[in-house]
Amino acid sequence: MKRKGPMTKGILKILIALLLTTAAILTTAPYVRAEEAGSKHLEEARITVEKSSLSKEAKTGILTNADRAVAAGIPAEDVSIIITRGLNQGVEGRHIEGFLETATRAKEQNLPVRLVLDRTEQGLAKGVPVEKISGVTQRLFGHLAAAKPIVNKFESGAVRSTRAKASDDAVETVARALEKSITQDAVMKTGEKVKDRKESIGLFNRAVDTMTTFAGSGMTAEQAAKMVHTAVDKGYSERDLEAMERYMVNELRKNRPMSEVVSGMNSRMERGDMRRDMQMQDRPGGGSMHEPGSGGMGGMSGMGGRR
Amino acid sequence: MKDGKELDKEIIHRLLDGDLGPDEKTALMDQIQADPALKEEFDGLTGALHAIEKSERMPAPPFFTAGIMRRLPARKAPIGNRVRDFLLKGRVLRWNMATAFAATMLLALVFTQAVRTRNTPVETAAVSQQEQTVTVTMNLHAPEAHQVAVAGTFNKWKADAHPLARQENGLWTITIPLKPGEYSYMFIVDGKAWVTDPNAETYSDDGFGNKNAVMRVRT
């Protein structure tokens, strides 16, 4: 039998060592890169705080809250944006601390924090008064806490989603629905209907989101819930629900009152014509949504959309 | 053909092995006592036996049996037996610190990957799908504007990150690559007026009393 010589064994060991080292580097590299990016963002925020005209106590308070937020798992980029945007808008230190505190509390309670961060960053960017941002984000935090058990209840025994973060998305969607005064009962009833159809959290998420869009467009919460429940009962898919939203938006663009739009949509659903009408409207040239200048705002007409 | 000496030695071996009867044993002992050469041979063998009996039993080195068995020529066994042996036969594994270290590293790697996969159940699949970006064009007709930008969830509402370019007909436009998903956005005209896209796919409340345009990007 031919035996491996010492040289062959040595090369083999070196190759194994190289392979293991490469695997270790590949495994840890994304974490290292994320860590470096996070440090960079925090450093930028730190410099902005140090350069600001805030008192020493206020500076310390912001930086302490920033460290705590990052330690809780909030992305350093978001922490940095809230601090720098807040300081650039002349927001007082205590309010910036409050924004970070709300996000950190949400994260520490294992709630999805993206919506809270988005509202804070958006409010600051749009120049919304800080008291209003603070109130909105704190209420949102409460809605997220209320939404979590609803989604958990839906998920027990429901078809598992294959999409990442589907559960977090659903918690945020339910929180936004609660924010629009849609009742917990209406949301849970949606969940039961989706479960009856053996559908996953994706359809639940879309149905609740459509309900919120309807309620946000002028329908009463009851009308929105009833319409979406009917759609789910009739086997509408996620795409169908999205098309319903577009249909309603286009009908409103024609300056039709919401009551007329609601009764029209309900009767179409009852007759089974809704899907056909939605498809016709979604065809190029089938509706008014791509016509330039169809909806002016502040003296400007728009041609939004995408291709 | 064996000579007389050879025969005597053979009988001595039988005596030491305990194979002789009492008469043969007595006759042989007399013969040994009478023949000095034979006696020397007998004493030597007896001494060697005593020495072996008194000596300490040395344990076989580790993997001695496995080593010996491995060197034996392979015997072709029926395929059924070989499969059964492969599955059920006890094995002796040779190992050293380098092998143990490599195995530990491999296990750690597999464990790390498993934990990451478990924490994000289908993240890998979702990321690979989301890594495909879709080119999206956004337009705003604003002939009186001096500058227009778009901000939204895709750029964390940075008001200066995505400026639109002005076309000849007063149309402002921008094309940006976005991953599939749902995005809220607004236009910022002249750096201060936040304007909702009047022709958006749909809308959502921004929570502060205004409406964001909503764009759904699909592959």
Image (cartoon, coloured by chain):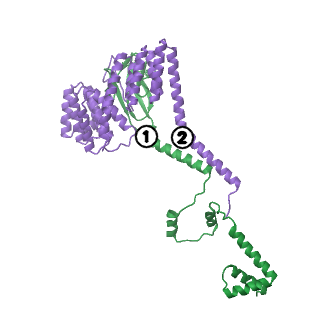
Q: Residues within 10 Å of mark 2 (few under 14, many from 20)?
A: some
Above or below, B113 against A289 in this view is below
Q: Inspect the image, locate mark 2, and give the three-letter code of the amino acid beneath it.
A: Thr
- Chain designation of label 1: B
Residue at the image position 73 percent from the left and 75 percent from the top = B46
Position of A204 with respect to A1 (left or right) is left
Query: A30 or B145, which is in the foreground?
Result: A30
- Residue at disc 1, secondary structure: helix
- Give whichever of A39, B158 is nearer the camera: A39
Quarter assignment of residue A190 = top left
Helix, strand or loop under label 2: helix
Q: Is residue A286 visible?
A: no
> Picture coordinates of residue A148 (x, y %)?
32, 34
Callout 2: chain: A
B48 on left or right of A185 = right
Measured from the top left, where is residue B142 in percent x and y? Answer: 38, 19
Q: Which chain is purple?
A: A
Chain B appears what colour? green
Tell me the number on the disc at residue A27: 2
Task: Please give left or right for residue B90 compared with residue A205 in the image.
Answer: right
Instruction: Locate the C terminus of chain A by quadrant.
Output: top left
Who's the residue at 70% across and 85% down the image?
B25
| Disc marking residue B119 | 1
User: At 53% across and 27% down in the image, what residue appears?
Assistant: A39
Q: Quadrant of the N terminus of chain A?
A: bottom right
| Front position in the image: A266 or A197 | A197
